[in-house]
Amino acid sequence: MAVTVQARGIQVVRAPSARAVTEADVRALEGNILTTTVDRIVAWSRKSSIWPVQFGLACCAIEMMSTAAARFDIARFGSELFRASPRQADLMIVSGRVSQKMAPVLKHIYEQMLEPKWVIAMGDCASCGGVFNNYALVQGVDKLIPVDVYVAGCPPRPEALLYGLLKLQELIASRPRT
């Protein structure tokens, strides 16, 4: 007994036996089957919905805020809005100079974030201290917390932050699930 299924203009005939199946039947069936792994689905969902917590400390924060505005629209990349609570975020964007007094606060907020969590160091000051090489400032956020992506510039343009976000998405998609 043959069963005919027609969907989207493709006709698949289910033959009474395996010998009666044609090559066209197999190709039509393969075009309608999706196979993947749980790791790939989890990685896709993580990279497609990153929620950042803002940690703007200086002039780079203005560029970070403009990234969320209509012109650059960070929502196109799955980062719909900046979260006010670290418990609702999985990405910390550190922008600007980090003083020695602010260092424990930064570390505490990072520790409040749930796993998995990522960090973008936005700007030269957050990445390496910038032009301010003195005792009052931390010479790079990576001295306090692990950084996944560095965005260079003084201050970096919103396009550079979006490029850093794309690089972070590639990094998330390539890592296995933990």
Image: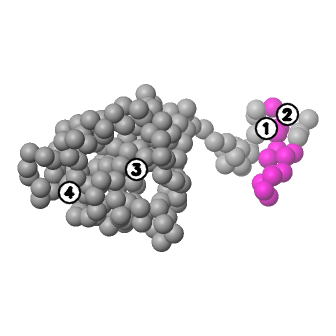
Type of the residue with mark 4: Asp
Sequence-first disc among 4 and 2: 2
Q: Position of residue 31 (x, y in %)?
A: 67, 48
Report, in whole angstroms, how far the alpha carbon at label 1 lies from the one at label 3: 62 Å
Residue 2 seen anywhere in this rendered image of the structure: yes
x, y percent for residue 128: 16, 50
Q: Secondary structure at mark 1?
A: helix
Camera-nearest label, 2 or 3: 3
In terms of sequence position, does the residue under pointer 2 or pointer 3 come before the other? 2
**Which label's residue is closer to the chain start, 1 or 4?**
1
Marks 3 and 4: in contact by CB < 8 Å? no
- Where is residue 20 drawn, in percent x and y? 79, 38
Q: Are marks 1 and 2 in contact (CB under 8 Å)?
A: yes
- Whole-Å distance between the Cαs marked 1 and 2? 7 Å
Q: Which residue is mark 2?
A: 16
How did the renderer colour the structure? one colour
| Distance between mark 1 and mark 4 Cα atoms | 67 Å
Label disc, if present, on residue 124 of the rendered structure = 4
Looking at the rendering, which quadrant does residue 159 occupy? Answer: bottom left
Q: Amino acid at mark 3?
A: Gln
- Magenta range: 4-17
Which residue is found at the position 41% from the left and 44% from the top? 91
Please identify the quadrant where the C terminus is shown.
top left
Quickly name the residue at label 1.
Answer: 20
Q: Are marks 1 and 3 in contact (CB under 8 Å)?
A: no
Residue tagged by mark 3?
54
Please tell me whether mark 1 or mark 3 is closer to you in this view. 3
